[in-house]
Image (cartoon, rainbow, N blue to C red):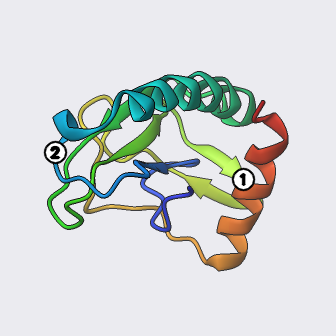
């Protein structure tokens, strides 16, 4: 699902369907699904936004359920629907304190742009 706060253009959250609080507690089926989903999301984001790197961050500090923040990384600013998206942390860790401001309409445009590239 699209991360409502866009750290970088196309930031997602990959959430386990199982209500577990430890990665090691996921079922084998969830690990199989994780493999399938990552094999779909990486090329979809690459086609959509041509990222330079892709970070998977499992923090689980606010929401304890198993999930990853999927953060496309960009060496240079990206433009999308008239907005400039900057990767404020590049080339280091993503900067969670400096997101790119978006609204519901922009977020929907991002979703609509990714989905046709998701196979």
Image coordinates of residue 52 in percent, x first then y, are 51, 23
Q: Which residue is mark 2?
A: 22
Quadrant for the N terminus, please: bottom right
Q: Which residue shows up at 61% across the image and 77% down it?
A: 103
Residue count near mark 2 (Cα–Cα under 10 Å), binned few <14, some 14–19, many ≥20: few
Q: Is residue 112 left or right of residue 57?
A: right
Q: Is the residue 40 above or below the residue 12 in the image?
A: above
Q: Which residue shows up at 59% across the image and 21% down it?
A: 39
Image coordinates of residue 83 in percent, x first then y, are 67, 61
Disc on res. 80: 1
Residue count near mark 1 (Cα–Cα under 10 Å), binned few <14, some 14–19, many ≥20: few
Front residue of this view, candidates 82 and 96: 96
Quadrant of residue 91 in the image?
top left
Quadrant of residue 107 in the image?
bottom right
Quadrant of residue 70 in the image?
top left
Q: Secondary structure at mark 1?
A: strand
Front residue of this view, candidates 84 and 27: 27
Quadrant for the C terminus, please: top right
The numbered mark, 1 or 2, whose residue comes first in the sequence reads: 2
The number of numbered badges drawn on the structure is 2
Disc on res. 11: none
Q: Which residue shows up at 85% across the image and 42% down it?
A: 116
Q: Which residue shows up at 30% across the image and 42% down it?
A: 89
Image coordinates of residue 32 in percent, x first then y, are 47, 24
Q: Is residue 89 left or right of residue 109?
A: left
Image coordinates of residue 27 in percent, x first then y, are 33, 35
Distance in Å between CA atoms under marks 1 and 2? 36 Å
């Amino acid at each position: 699902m699209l991360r409502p706060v866009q750290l970088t253009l196309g930031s997602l959250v990959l959430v386990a369907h199982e209500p577990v609080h430890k990665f090691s507690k996921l079922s084998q089926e969830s690990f199989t699904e994780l493999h399938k989903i990552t094999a779909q999301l990486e090329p979809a984001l690459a086609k959509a936004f041509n990222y330079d790197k892709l970070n998977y961050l499992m923090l689980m500090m606010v929401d304890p359920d198993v999930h990853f923040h999927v953060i496309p990384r960009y060496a240079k600013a990206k433009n999308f629907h008239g907005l400039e998206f900057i990767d404020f942390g590049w080339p280091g860790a993503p900067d969670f304190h400096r997101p790119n401001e978006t609204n519901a309409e922009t977020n929907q445009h991002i979703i609509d742009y990714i989905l046709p590239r998701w196979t």
